[in-house]
Structure formats: structure tokens, C-alpha cells
Image (spheres, rainbow, N blue to C red):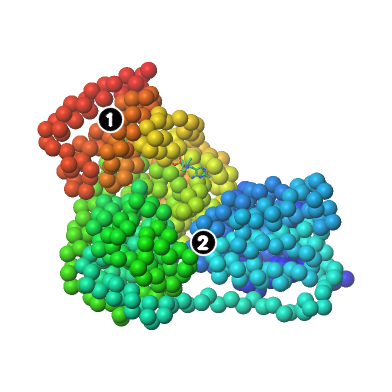
Amino acid sequence: MAEQRTAADTLVDRLVDWGVEAIFGLPGDGINGLMEALRKRRDRIRYVHVRHEEVAAMAAVGYAKFTGRLGVCFATSGPGAVHLLNGLLDAKVEQAPLLAITGMSYHDLIGTSYLQDINTDYLFNDIALYNQRIMGPAHVTNVVDYAVRTALSQRGPAHLAFPIDYQAAPAGSGTRYVRNVPGHTSTTFRAPVRVPCRADLEAAAQALAGRTKVAILAGAGARGAGDELEAVAELLGAPIVKAQLGKDCVPDDSPYTTGPIGLVGSLPSEEALEQCDALLIVGSTMPYIEYYPKPGQAVCVQIDDKPERMGLRHPVDVPLCGDAGATLAALRPLLTRNDDRGFLTRAQEGMARWWELMAERGSRTDVPMKPQVPAWALNDALAPDAIVCGDSGTVTTWAARQIKLRRGQAFSFSGTNCSMAAGLPYAIGAQTAYPGRQVVVFTGDGSLTMQLGDFLTAVQHDLPIKVVVVRNDTLGLIKWEQMVFLGNPEYGVDVAPLDFVKFAEACGAKGVRIDDPRRCGAQLADALATDGPVIVECVVDQHEPPMPARVRKDQVSKLAKALRSGTPNRNRIALDMVKDLLDEASFQASPARAIPDRAGHALSGLAGRLRNRADDEHSE
Ligand SMILES: Cc1ncc(C[n+]2csc(CCOP(=O)(O)OP(=O)(O)O)c2C)c(N)n1
Ligand SMILES: [Mg+2]
């Protein structure tokens, strides 16, 4: 007897028709009907079995971010669906096209306190851009098509709740209303190419004409538009300041970029936005509003494909609603060349000094090793087409500043959603999409231990992901925020030390420990050249401060207050800061450049006293 086709078969076939090649999830009795359909199509759609449903959704986000295609995930009803939630939020905030499928109670037991009974469509109501409950086999194709189209066109999460009994029901069973004509919807999607009208482009060109200090702020929306961006930067003599989500829109060694901005930013980026008389924003709503030019300082042209985002962070004179690449290409011929190259030249000189400082911080030989050292060493170890997945924490700062991304390399992290533990899941998604590329996670010990079980996903699926974990035994970023933003002693941030090398080995993978800065480069290069998944544990100085490029007075006084009011290891922290200042005194891009010689002598004396006290502190 021919096998009966189910409604779940209809759903999975439709996903295959949409070109879906991979799906991330974890089974349960609420979704086993879908599992059977996946099993039967395992040669057409790759099922990646994760250890936690959040990772399934985050992996789908990573897949979407690095491919521009739809990411798909699933979970069982109740707790499985709840676990997916943060990944859906990530897709929404980070604007990644995602389809989530969740199981739901039997259609005629919904709302009866049945096993794992939660209305998953209600649960995702505040997050999903498209959110429907499948009402029977005849409903499946219609909602799958619309869900996929919505996720792709609005770049966000769509969700389908699939009652258990409907999943396994015969595909042709149930009622079909007469107007629901079979075959009336199709797998049609063509991404529009949006270009603003000629009048708007001319207005933008006019607004920028004659300006001699133009800065460009580029974000995630500028990814893939790097050539156009650099061509416009050349015409306008404009430095490109990059929001961290746009780190790979132009390479870090482009002569036009001043690198990152915000708390994790560079001094030349800060100066460019502080001094510019015109601002061209391309695909960015970078959230650190205090780093934008002051309202009224600069004429502003903003390119974004979402009109509601115009003027979100900075007043806009000419909004250009369109795609970054196409809009820049249409704008370029209308622009007047800025022959005054002073602003760009000064930014380039500033960047040369900034890279000297980054090299100094990245090559220090102190023990414990400085966290900047492994980040800097990655520059020699990364493959030309490496994909780097970052994470939330002080690690964001080291990745933003020390990793000098080259043309052909890609980077992302959970930026605006700023979720911890996105790095490994994003890498699972990226490596699934690109089995032949080097995929590297740069993460913290807090983040990695949040989803550590999913290192096994990499092992199980032969995903040769390299996890570089910065081990400082603390939730470093929060420790510094408590002190520098609030003036409070650190509290509740210790992370119990874990031997990641043993953990990797227990998983059947390779583990490498790096604690000697002099051997860091060679060890990292070896680890990245090893076959299969690897965890590289970098043991670092937990007291190294992730200071902004320019330190404000109130930050110093808050920190002093925190140290006075009982922060553990306060002498060690103070010693690290004083030593950093002394080491960097001759670097123009360092905050230490402003310290007069006489104060330098006093600081050396202070360092000696702090060292004694720190030793006592250690033996207390
Ligand atoms: C899911 C989630 N929980 C909490 C936070 C707040 N948070 C941001 S960074 C961070 C610490 C990260 O620690 P770790 O991974 O060890 O990196 P480090 O700061 O030490 O470099 C925390 C708790 C968050 N962003 N996301
Ligand atoms: Mg940490």
C-alpha cells in the first residue's frame, strides 16, 4: 500500500520548494509528525540536531545573517517553544529572515490544561511578524507561503503553530472551503531593488555639495555594498565609521574606514563624528546616540530601506529610502567631488596612530595574558574567507578593535539584541551553510557556558567550528559597567572556572589552552588549522579594562568610587590601569598621551605601591 502523505509532508515539501536546505531543531512528541516528514526527506533537507531550542533559533539567525537566505527552526510544544523565544527575538531585532515551526496540543484539546499546553501563537505574538495557527491540512501551503514571504520581505521572524494531530493527518483530509482553490498560492519571492526617486537623490547630492568634512556612518544595512561605499567615500573625501554590525561592510584595512564607534569604538571614529559638517548614514541605526554629531551640527542624509527608521537617532535633512548598494550607485554620479582632502587625510593619520596602539595592546607580553592578545593574534590565523561570530561582553570590545577584518572575511554578532551566547549558535548556522569555510567563534566564558552543550552539536554534525573562548572567570562587561557606570563595587559576576580543554576532550574534540602571550600566535594558528571542532581556551587577565577611546571624567570618578567602596582586587585593578597608562604614554591615540612627564614619574611610584598592595591583596 502506498504510504499515506501527511500534512507535515506537505509542509516540508513546501519548504524544499522554497529552497530551504537546512533546518535546526530538537524533537518532542509535540513535533514528531514533522520529524517523520523530515526523516523521509533527509536527502533534501539537512536536519541539524541541537541541544537547546534557543540554539536552533539562533543558528537559524546566523544562517540567515551570513547567507541572506531564510533560516528555519522548529521546537516541540510548550517548553520547547518557550526555549525558541530568544532566538526569535534575535531575528526580530537583528532583522534576520526566519521561520519557526512549533508543535501545539491536539486541535480539540487546546486550552484544556493538556500536556505542554500553551498557545504558542499567543506566546510569540509580540515578536513574530507573521504568526498563525495551522487550522487543518488544507491550510498548510497557504500559510507556509505567506510566512516565508513575510520573513524575507520584512527581514524578521515568522511563526507557524502546528497542532500535533494535524501534523500526522492525511494531507487531503479535513474540510477544504470551496474558495480555498488548491494550487492558488506559489513560492514566488523576488527581493525588490529599491532606489529613491530622482528628486530625492538630487536633494541629497545638493545637501552634501560643498561640504568639506563629510563622515559616513555605515551599519548592517551596508553589508554587501562595500564597493559603492568606498567609491562614495573617495568622492566625498569621507571617512567611513562602522557600527559594529557593519564591521564587514568594508574591510578594516580599507583606507577609508576609521573602524568601530561607540563604547567599543576608535578615537578617529569619535573625532570624525564630532567634527563633521555632513553625515551620510548608510543602513545604520547605531544605538549610541551620544556618539552622533550634535543635532544641528551636520547636514544629514540617511539611506535606509525602512522609511520608519529615518531620523531615529539623528535628525535627517534628506531621507533616501532604498537599498544601500543601489541607492549609493544612483547617488554617486550626482555627487560633487570634495577636493579638500584634509578631513579624510586627518582621519587616515589618526587611524595609523590608532593601529599602532592596537598593535601595542595586542602584542603585550604581560602574564596573565591581556585579552587583546588572542584577538590580535587571530589576524594572522584567520583564513582569507573566514567567518567570525562574535559575542556580548568585553569580548565585543576586543573583537571590534583588535580584529582587523580583511576583504572576503565576514563578521556578525548579536548586536542590537546584544544577546549573550549567540556566537556558537551563529557559527553552527554559518558552518552548516558553508561547510568549506573556516568558521571561528570569539566568545567569553560567561556566554559559552550558557550554551556549552551545543558544542556537541558541532561534534555530532562534523561542523569544524573553532571556538576561541576568552576565559577571565567573570562576566567581565557587567563587572566594569557596575563600577564605571554606577560607581558600585562589582557584585555577582564571578564565573566558576571551567577547564574548557578537558570539556572539549570529553566531547571527543580537541582542546587547546593558551596562557603564554609569547606562544599565543603560533598556538592559535595551529588550532585553527586543525581538522574538526576545537575549543581554544585563552586564559586572560580579568582586570584589563575595556575603556572607551576617550575616558570621561565622570567615568573615572565612578570607578574611583567603586574601588573605594570595597571592590575586590581594587589594588590589582588600579595597578593594571596605571601600568596600561605608563605603557601607552608614547602612543598618540591613547588616553595616556595627555599625561605630563612629571605625572608619569608620580604614576611609576604609584604603580610600585599598588604592586605591593596587590600582592598583599592576593595573599589575603
Ligand atoms: C542573555 C543575556 N543575559 C545577560 C546579558 C547581560 N550581559 C552582557 S555581557 C555579559 C557578560 C558576558 O560575560 P562573558 O561571556 O564572560 O564575557 P566577558 O564580558 O567576560 O568578556 C552579560 C551578563 C546579555 N547581554 N544577554
Ligand atoms: Mg568572561
Q: How far across and how far down the image is residue 301, in percent? A: 35, 68
Say which residue appears at 27% left-offset and 30% top-offset: 575
Say which residue appears at 59% left-offset and 66% top-offset: 151
Task: Give the mark nearest the N terminus, 2 or 1.
Answer: 2
From this view, report whether residue 604 is shown above or below residue 502: above
Q: How crowded is mark 1: few (under 14 residues within 10 Å), some or many (20 or more)?
A: many
Query: Which residue is label 1 attached to?
Result: 575
Ligand 1 contact, mark 2 (Cβ < 8 Å): no
Say which residue appears at 29% left-offset and 35% top-offset: 556
Looking at the rendered structure, the secondary structure element under dot 2 is: loop
Q: How crowded is mark 2: few (under 14 residues within 10 Å), some or many (20 or more)?
A: many
Q: Nearer the viewer, residue 113 or 54?
A: 113
Q: How many marks?
A: 2
Q: Which residue in the rendered view is the most extreme toward the right?
A: 1
Q: Which of 428 and 352 is in front in this view?
A: 352
Kindly tell me whether residue 181 is visible in this rendering.
yes
Query: Which residue is label 2 attached to?
Result: 95
